[in-house]
Image (tube, rainbow, N blue to C red):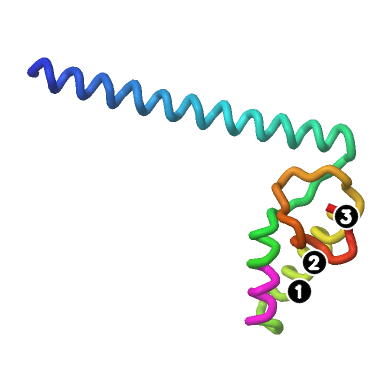
Amino acid sequence: MTFPAIVVMLISILSLWGVAALTMVYSMRQEERKLELLQQQEGFEPFSAKAQRDMERWLIRFPNGEQAEEMRGLLEEQRRSLVTNRRRFYTWAAGSGVRGTQQ
């Protein structure tokens, strides 16, 4: 094997492990935030603003679909969580979330 091939292989291996390590650290920090919210306020919103919008759009398109009742239940759970939990896990832009609740 040539020297340049060995260098490229080593750089590739180091890059792979570096990205994997950074991803793991980021994930663990997110889990720590979730655990902190669970300990302090016993919950956090189950879905991000984007996921909530996607579910609402799905319900508009398929109001009588097989999973429509399940979607309504999940959105109700999200609404209750946003009302009862003051601190948020996901980033919410102004105007997103449940109407009438403080962000």
Judge by depth and name the residue closer to the eye, 76 or 68: 76
Start-end of magenta stretch: 55-61
Q: Nearer the viewer, mark 2 or mark 3?
A: 3
Judge by depth and name the residue closer to the eye, 64 or 53: 53
Q: Is residue 81 visible?
A: no
Which quadrant holds residue 14?
top left
Q: Which residue is mark 3?
A: 102
Q: Is residue 39 left or right of residue 74?
A: right
Near mark 3 (Cα within 10 A), the count class, few <14, some 14-19 or many ≥20, is few
Q: Is residue 68 visible?
A: yes
- At 79% across and 45% down in the image, what residue appears? 88
Q: Nearer the viewer, mark 1 or mark 3?
A: 3
Judge by depth and name the residue closer to the eye, 22 or 68: 22
Q: Which residue is mark 2?
A: 73
Q: Secondary structure at mark 2?
A: helix
Q: Is residue 23 above or below residue 70?
A: above
Query: Who comes first in sequence, dot 2 or dot 3?
Result: 2
Query: Who comes first in sequence, dot 1 or dot 3?
Result: 1
Q: Secondary structure at mark 3?
A: loop
In the rendered image, the residue lying farthest to the top is 3
Magenta stretch prevailing secondary structure: helix
| Mark 1 and mark 3 residues within 8 Å of each other at the beta carbon | no
Residue 34, position as x, y percentages in the image: 74, 37
| Mark 1 and mark 2 residues within 8 Å of each other at the beta carbon | yes
Q: Which residue is mark 1?
A: 69
Which quadrant holds residue 83?
bottom right
